[in-house]
Image (spheres, rainbow, N blue to C red):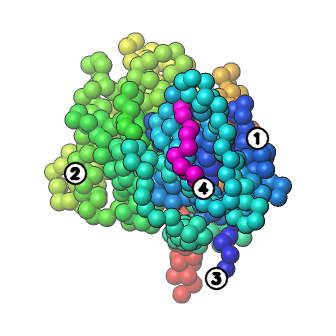
Amino acid sequence: MSAPRLLDIDLGTTPFSRRGSYFAVSRVTDQQDGGVYLRTVRGDARHREIVRLLLDGGTEAQSRTTAGKLTLRHGTTRVEAVLDGPGRACLRVREGSLTLDFRATSQYDAVFQENEDTWRFIDSGANRNYRIRVIGGRARFEARWDGVRNSEARLRIAAPDGTATIVVDEYGSAVPTGPLDDPDALAAVAQADFDAWCRTHGGAERDDPVMGDTVRLAAFVTWAAIVPPGGALRRESMLMSKNRMTNVWSWDHCFNAMALWRDPRAAADQLFAVFDHQDEHGCLPDYVNDAGVERNFVKPPIHGWSIAHLMDRGGLTEEATAALYEPLRRWTEWWFAHRVYGDDGIPSYNHGNDSGWDNATTFGVGVPVQSPDLLAHLALQMQTLALIARRTDRPDEAAAWTRRAGATVRTLCDRFWTGERFVARDTLTGEVIDSRSLLTFMPLILGELLPTAVRDTTVRRLLDGGYLTPHGPATEPPGSPHYEADGYWRGPIWAPSTMLLADGLRRSGRPDLADDIEARFMATCAGAGMAENFDAMTGAGLRDRSMTWTASVYLSMVSDRAGRRALAADALCERAS
């Protein structure tokens, strides 16, 4: 058997984890006590760092990563980390020593010895308890009790004559009693699972000499971010990240589902992970994690667009498609029943967060806002409902949804098209909001549903307005007085806006421009990894540096590009014959 292939990742940006685990190992640089940490990604953790791993007592360590095993080195010490199930981490020390520096930072934290080779960490800040067992080697425990809690605790494990294994188990009221499997066997199982995932979702491009490393990175980011069912999560779900963004947000999950089109069951799980929490009014939550849901905000209704995307590629079963009809209908109707504040019938965003473009200049003067992208998303949602209705033998409903989609597009053009551009409006006054945000270009997602003159004028403004940088479409043009290099939605390039825009341009008859935008974005990912967003002028990765929706968009673009090449080759062969 060949050795597992190394992954070119930096623990400072991409955490080591695996499918099914709530543990991650990361190099933390944004805290006073920097170093390599074992962390939790549970949804209700008030702090995530559990223990700092000090090799030979030092904070620095070199790392080598495969999908199944992380190897850390410093001085004479080598430590191998393997994860097992949702809450077990195995650390194997080879020679030298490893010190577990417990992050006892909350007022009720306690670390104490249970018996000769077992300790417990009551980690109130993480809302979890941990049991640490040492097998082999020599252990020395040092702690400081301040009368209420442990303000400091360290466990040093030395393996001068061979190896020592440390098993960290997360638990609630009862510690796990299952046997300890061989770490090498666990690593092999994880590696095989990743290899299968990469073969499926990376396609043949995973072995491409130019893009293969980036494809494997994107595949690892998505695979490693998956957590098992449990708590509020009713099915296997892909978190946005195992850095800090440890939730499933209600539009992010759409992009993750789309990347999994080759496995319809997995794609459906990502969609239903959020639809499982649709409330009695039809509203979707802002996000969900294992600990619960957040309902202060919502996210834009791109679900119809993403479901149609999956249907076009055979990425949903007939059963899943039919099951999505009623939830999608209720989500569409909710906007008109609960977010229309006047007599014009046009729904509003209560906050920038509702749009997904949190601080875009569209929301710079206040809320609520009527933004043109919202009607565009809803019109596409109606089109998808019509498509599903036709496939499930509901011709009258299909016709009604088609008529309603057309009326929604007419309202969009009548109310938000000035003759030169789309604008957002103050909901209460109807006044045009002075904004150059790329958000106002999102009606292009309607493609052929927009009048030709409107499409062409919008595309010209996109090209002439300075939005397209060498790395992709800036969310606020660099020439804007409101542009910020690291301004979140006021300048940086984002995966979701790029994919939506490119898809709309392709359906607007501009495949050349769509291809160009995708190529710029893919090159940026190849250079800077799967960051939350990117500096529009330099391409540098910003904020959370290991985001699944960025990886998913990259994988979707790779697979779609391969599909278009294959279709072109088939057409050429037909003409030749």
Earlier along the polypeptide chain: callout 2 or callout 1? 2
Q: Quadrant of the N terminus?
A: bottom right
Which residue bears the numbered disc 3?
1
Q: Which one is closest to the eye, mark 2 or mark 1?
A: 1
Q: Which one is closest to the eye, mark 4 or mark 2?
A: 4
Tell me how far mark 3 sits from mark 1, CA to CA. Answer: 42 Å
User: Dots 3 and 1: beta carbons under 8 Å?
Assistant: no
Tell me how far mark 4 sits from mark 1, CA to CA. Answer: 47 Å
The residue located at (47%, 40%) in the rendering is 128
Q: Which residues are magenta?
A: 109-118
Give the percent coordinates (x, y) of residue 117: 58, 53
Which residue bears the numbered disc 4?
134
Q: Is residue 410 above or below residue 470?
A: above
User: Callout 1, which amino acid?
Assistant: Thr
Which residue bears the numbered disc 1?
538
Q: Is residue 389 above or below residue 252?
A: below
The residue located at (62%, 49%) in the rendering is 25
Taken as a whole, is the magenta stretch helix, strand or loop?
Answer: strand
Which residue bears the numbered disc 2?
398
Q: Which one is closest to the eye, mark 3 or mark 4?
A: 4
The residue located at (68%, 21%) in the rendering is 481
